[in-house]
Image (cartoon, grey):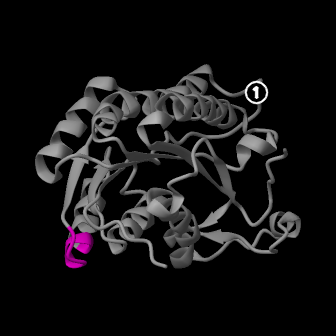
Amino acid sequence: MNIDLSGKTALITGAAGELGRVIARTLAECGADIALHYHSSEAKAAELKSEIEALGRRAVTVKADVTKQDSIEAMKQAAEAALGQVDIVVANAVVQYKWTSVLEQPAEDYASQFESCVMQSVYLAKAFIPAMIEKKGGRFIGINTECSMQNFPTQSAYVAGKRGMDGVYRVLAKEVGEHQITVNQVAPGWTISERERTNGLDESGDYIKQVPLKRRGTDQEIANAVAFLASDLASFITGAYIPVSGGNVMPAI
């Protein structure tokens, strides 16, 4: 049994980032053509485009501010002009900021997380789901986080944004399910990325001690979960929040 995305087009936001690059490559390896969103990392996006084309897939780079609806609409038009209708949307981009306590966290950080987690997802849905409804099928996948279940000190702005995102995805799954569109979330744990492989791993034994599998996950393991949810193998899974964290967080029933 193989994951086959042949004939599909996927758009990944934040595709030039650490995790986004691996998701993009993985979906391309499964046969999808890829629209690579970036905000400021144009050179990395162009390099990734060349990698994907070397795999025999079509690719296009699209610049956008995912916190602005008009920018996402322009991104949609550019992606579809180059590759045709988008079948798979992966909302991976998020604004980065310095974590601190609730009392010290600047108010604008809460706003940035709301805009990049909640409103990005809303704008992407408004842009891409109508065509999926017309086609009677599609995949809408968001990258959440294990932090949404942890609620540790200094996580408040990030958790607030990702929990709001979670609410949007669960409601959206119920609203568009009749059209055979699935809406799911992948929630990574603390993930090993290309940057760490280059610069050296942070072993952080205290973190690993609490993970049942006694290790950190890799970006490829996150991308594998995304590829599964994007495929027909996951055609009856929707509304799910799926931790890929080695058991570090476990949703209760």
- Identify residue for label 1: 102
Task: Answer with the quarter of the image where residue 207 lies.
Answer: bottom right
Q: Label 1: state its secondary structure.
A: loop
Whole-percent x, y for residue 19 in the image:
49, 61
The answer to whether any part of residue 65 appears in the image is: no
Compared with residue 150, is residue 189 higher up or lower down, i.e. above or below?
below
- Asked whether residue 245 is drawn in magenta, I would say no
Whole-percent x, y for residue 176 in the image:
46, 32
Compared with residue 92, is residue 176 higher up or lower down, i.e. above or below?
above
Whole-percent x, y for residue 70 in the image:
26, 24
Q: Nearer the viewer, residue 104 or 7?
A: 7
Left or right placement of residue 253 versus residue 217 in this view: right
Compared with residue 78, is residue 26 higher up or lower down, i.e. above or below?
below
Dot 1: within a 10 Å radius of its alpha carbon, few (fewer than 14), some, or many (20 or more) residues?
some
Taking the view exactly as shown, the residue that stands out farthest to the left is 81
For image coordinates 62% across by 29% down, the residue present is 167
The answer to whether any part of residue 140 appears in the image is: yes
Left or right placement of residue 154 versus residue 20 in this view: right
For image coordinates 56% across by 31% down, the residue present is 174
Check disc 1 and give the amino acid type.
Val
Q: How many marks?
A: 1
Quadrant of the snapshot with the C terminus = top right
Magenta highlight range? 51-57
- Asked whether residue 53 is drawn in magenta, I would say yes
